[in-house]
Image: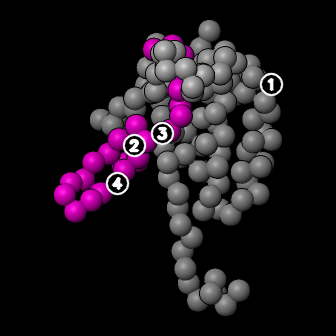
Amino acid sequence: MRSETIEIACANRGYNKQQIEDAAAMMPESLQAFIRGVAFQAVIVEDLNDGRIPDHKNYGQTKYEPVFDLSVPGPAGLGLAFNSAHYWFTSTNAGARLQILDRGDAVYFGTHPEFQQIHADALTYKAPVKNEENEKN
């Protein structure tokens, strides 16, 4: 059964959501959403895989990655982005390791609104703003 919220996914896998939140809150503010997003992604994937771990050495084992719909409102750059002198391109195939063992579960992850926001947070690093006060310390 697919978890409908991150709270349910945490409970299913034996994690305390508040402890994850508290651990992320100990980081600098610019990293908190990123750290929380990465941790929650790991919990969601573990839950969708029902605790089974994809075998990354077994190329015969089918694995799926969630695909996030970029047409829905949300942060820009919901994939992993890079640019070059020749073209601009976004992709989620840069070794993200969000590997899910069931295609339907991967689709569910990629289309679930709460999980989309968690994914966006995991890809968003907000650099600290430099100002004179920061540079004095």
Distance from the alpha carbon under mark 4 to that under mark 1: 36 Å
Write down the region rendered in magenta: 75-103
Front tag of 4 and 1: 4
Q: Which residue is mark 2?
A: 79
Distance from the alpha carbon under mark 2 to that under mark 3: 12 Å
Image coords of residue 9 (percent x, y): 68, 24
Locate residue 36 relative to residue 88 in the image: left or right.
right
Q: Residue furthest top?
A: 1
Element marked by disc 1: loop
Front tag of 1 and 3: 3
Q: Is residue 68 magenta?
A: no
Distance from the alpha carbon under mark 3 to that under mark 4: 14 Å
Element marked by disc 3: loop
Point out the tag, 1 or 2, that comes first from the N-terminus.
Answer: 1
Q: Can residue 59 be seen by looking at this rendering? A: yes
Q: Can residue 6 be seen by looking at this rendering? A: no
Q: Which mark is residue 14?
A: 1
Identify the image quadrant of residue 91.
top left
Query: Amino acid type of disc 4?
Result: Phe
Q: Which residue is mark 4?
A: 82
Q: Is residue 101 magenta?
A: yes
Query: Amino acid type of disc 2?
Result: Gly
Point out the tag, 1 or 3, that comes first from the N-terminus.
Answer: 1
Image coords of residue 37 (percent x, y): 60, 43
Query: Amino acid type of disc 1?
Result: Gly
Identify the image quadrant of residue 82.
bottom left
Distance from the alpha carbon under mark 1 to that under mark 3: 27 Å
Element marked by disc 4: strand
At 67% from the left edge and 30% from the top edge, which residue is drawn?
Answer: 43
At 24% from the left edge and 53% from the top edge, which residue is drawn?
Answer: 88
Q: Which mark is residue 95?
A: 3
